[in-house]
Image: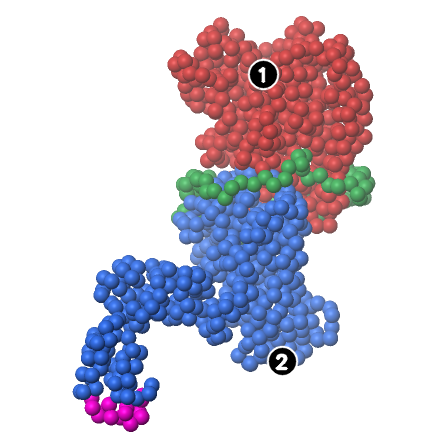
Chain colours: A blue, B green, C red
Amino acid sequence: MTATTDRTVPYADALTRYEPVMGLEVHVELSTATKMFCGCATEFGAEPNTQTCPVCLGLPGALPVVNRTAVESAIRIGLALNCRIAEWCRFARKNYFYPDMPKNFQTSQYDEPIAFDGWLDVEVPANEAGEPPFTFRVEIERAHMEEDTGKSTHVGGATGRIHGADYSVVDYNRAGIPLIEIVTKPLVGAGDRAPEVARAYVAALRDLLRALDVTHGRMEQGNIRCDANVSLMPIGSEVLGTRTETKNVNSLRSVERAVRYEITRHAAVLDAGEKVFQETRHWHEDTGITTAGRPKSDADDYRYFPEPDLVPVAPSREEVERLRATLPENPAERRKRLQGEWGFSDLEMRDVVNAGAVEVIEETVAAGASPAAARKWWTGDLARRANADGVAVTDLGVTPAHIAELDGLVTGGRLNDSMARQVMDGVVAGEGTPTQVADARGLELVQDDGALQAAVDKVIAANADVAEKIKGGKVQAAGALIGQVMKEMRGQADAAKARELILATLGVEG
Amino acid sequence: MSNLSRDDVAHVAMLARIQLEDHELDRLAGQLDQIVDWVGQINEVAAADVPPMSHPLPLVNVTRPDEVRPSLTQQQALANAPDPEGGRFGVPRILDEE
Amino acid sequence: MTARDLTRLTALQMADGLAAGEFTSVELTQAHLDRIERLNPSLNAYLLVDAEGALATAANVDAARAAGEDLPRLAGVPVAVKDIACTRGLPTTAGSRMLEHFVPPYDATIVTRLKDARMPILGKTNMDEFAMGSSTEHSAFGPTRNPWDLERIPGGSGGGSSAAVAAYLAPLAIGSDTGGSIRQPAAVTGSVGVKPTYGAVSRYGIIALASSLDQIGPCARTVADAALLHEVLAGHDPMDSTSIDAPVPPVVAAATGTRDLTGLRVGVVKEIAREGYQEGVSRCFEEALQHLRDLGAQVVEVSCPHFVHAMAAYYLIQPSEASSNLARYDAMRYGSRTTPEGSPSAEQVMAASRDAAFGDEVKRRIILGTYALSSGYYDAYYGQAQKVRTLIAGDFTAAFEQADVLVSPTTPTTAFRIGDKLDDPMAMYLNDIATIPANLAGVPGMSIPSGVADEDGLPVGFQLLAPAMEDQRLYAVGAALEARLAEAQGGYVFEKAPEIEVQA
Ligand SMILES: [Zn+2]
């Protein structure tokens, strides 16, 4: 196949004539222990076809049984997206032939989704062009339960891609893993910010799903996959244009880029007086373009009908309320609340969020540390250590309780900052709690003012010139003396106290 | 009047992934047209307000706990495969991704 | 006792004889294997005989009994399994070329239950391909022949199981009934067949025809034998979402209890009992009604007006579900693969394999079902059929207010000649006119032999239907009628079958 490069028009130009309309379909792989309809494990990275059974291989005679936890997750997702939860709904068979689908139908939901009619408010940040942040309400059409397919690998051919491959090999470990498909209503009115809205929505959804603890949420492993529908409406018109569906856009950045690209491509087609062809498109991360996939055709006659091997799902209202009570706070709202409680600046909070340290800081504060100390440790010293070791900051063996204890030692006057870092070395090395490490290493500020005074006197005597400068009003010159005092004390002194004593000895007001 | 033409049968057969030979089409098309004509009588039977019955039992909420059960071994999974390769199922080239 | 005598016993007598130490399970099993070896070439009732496995189980039971172990009632009594049930390590074909070499890695739940009951499994019985048919002529492995007349069909789809039981090649067998595939073969072979309430017996591991209609049940020579096997098979299975989670009805107690039917209301369903039946079938039916009256029952006529549409609804729902259930047979993961010339795509290999490995009847129904579900036709066909199903269920509810059991002849005719209806699918479908309503509504049904038609000397079946979860009523009434008929006719109907002549 030779992929011809499509014409596009400059993005800003396209937006002068057309209003983009988007629809986003996000597939979320649930993090249940077992598959949707059988007891096979869902572990990522197992040997091929070792997590299969008669059910998920589609063997003759096998029958599905619904995973209770998957249904509960679906309901919790629906509730978190402000959806209504069906009082009664069914699974349906979506019939089409494909080698990675063992039964040649996908057990899904059709006109009776478990959750429907919801919304999610999405914070779209300020952009590089200096446009301000804003909130966009994404209306949710539905969230429904279904199962994943197997994974084919294409062998032979020039590119290793599906086209030109000689044959394929299929691993069904993934077949039957529970998926929730979340479909938005058409998103209109975002104008030139539409691609940013798409990205912000997927990001917000990912954060929400992680907070719900229903998915591993790793887009790079395909836990969250996005299909982006785009069409253009001439400005002033109310007739929706023909849409294309760009499949499997699997990073936040790609979502934004793919939508942007399709807008520029559609605009070029429409500008030329031609029609947009209704088809699926494939996104190419490397070149930043989409290429034509399969046109919509007869093969899309999915012959849906209610799955006769399963009985309806009818969650009682009590059950729904029980699940509602398990919902975590919406991540965006929670962040706003915590930022206020902790007194962090926008910039500080952004660093905390980017470092994925919101939870651990919350726990550290709860354990008794000050928010500032918690932030400093988790996004500073510990983040650097984790980075250097290539592990997660929470995998260093340091607990929120450790940080709180260490902070107590500093504020209580036992340790200074440099001693605290030495204590942390010991904690990371597994030598014990901060107090145990400090005891074992003999780290303690000298509390004896006599010893400190003696050191101050000694240093002043040895640096009469500097002392004169300080007396003359150059208070900042005290820094040089403090260093020497600390050296005299072999680091075991409180630098602030040393400064105080130096100035007092010289009769200067700090 | 014919409900189901020879072309219709060929088309539906392809939806069902059956590559009918010409002589099969000749034989099956007429029979299927007759059957469709006969089952079509059902069209006038039930009023719009009759609820459909997809299932004989009024069961709901049959689920299982999210507990891992033993899977087949790779060897068992592939035992009936026409063309196994390296622990996977070999299949002919796939035309396009879904 | 001679080997011949052993095979002539009822399952109940076999169980009692084993328990009393009159003979061993190995002797009993070997007697059946010998008879199978001699007669199966003529009958083609078994597609596969597992002599080794059956004898191993038998020897095991004999040893356990000798050691004084407590054993299940049917321990050591052999059984035949329709080739629609997956048996681990034993080829399971569903009568199709597609699965000619398929060996399941797992047992159907009912096979596990047979093994738990310690019943030697003699082998796998012949059937119409994927259970589509009423004559077993649609088996890819040749038709099964009726023990009463080798030129005639044994019914279908479970002709192999019924023929095996009727010909003493097994005392008991497993059947599956989607539109009559247990009851119709029972009727034309002079044996007993029961379709339990939908959901009473697990479908896990049973190769699906139409999921919302399929039900597994026992084939036997007597009502009490059927009840014994029913109790082994029935009960909740967490692997089948449509399985009933309730105690199994007391079918053995019912089959061996009182023969007095005083106060019982028997409803003759006008729409499936009075017209279009062969003369001998009608006569046997009327005689059976008189026997029921003699036993104290009150016979009333009931009307189920929507039953006339049952056939059409069935031939939409069943092919629709089948078209989807059979989609998995694409020769990618298992099954017979046909590769066309050149460098074909997966799609082309699937289409060629399905064309080559499916028989005509399977193709007809897959195409019909695909058509009925396709966009633009769903509401007119499948959707409408589901509504008619509601109306038929409503007819049953109303009829069961007037009667405790409903009755009809099981089939319009006695066994027809092999080949007679093979080229006329519509004529073939009409064999199931009386049995289909029970599947649509999910209620239990039973066929027992009620006599022999004068005009052809072939057995006739009498159908009993009961409300859902009331399977024991079938056994109580069936056993009473069976006993009365045996008394009046000087023996059981199945005993009147001629001895089979071994083909040269
Ligand atoms: Zn599985």
What residue is rendered at 27% in x and 79% in y?
Answer: A498
Residue placed farthest to the bottom in the image? Answer: A472
In this view, the residue in front, A111 or C147, is: A111
Residue A172 seen: no
Q: Is residue A471 magenta?
A: yes
Q: Which mark is residue A13?
A: 2
In this view, the residue in front, C30 or A18, is: A18
Q: Is residue A43 magenta?
A: no
Q: Residue A309 appears at what percent x and percent y?
A: 60, 39
Q: Residues within 10 Å of mark 2 (few under 14, many from 20)?
A: few
**Label 2 near label 1: C-beta < 8 Å?**
no
Q: Left or right? Give the position of A92 relative to A349.
A: right
- The subunit carrying tag 2 is A
Part of the protein shown in magenta: A463-477
Up/down of B41 relative to C282, above or below: below
Q: Which mark is residue A365?
A: none
Q: Which mark is residue C225?
A: 1
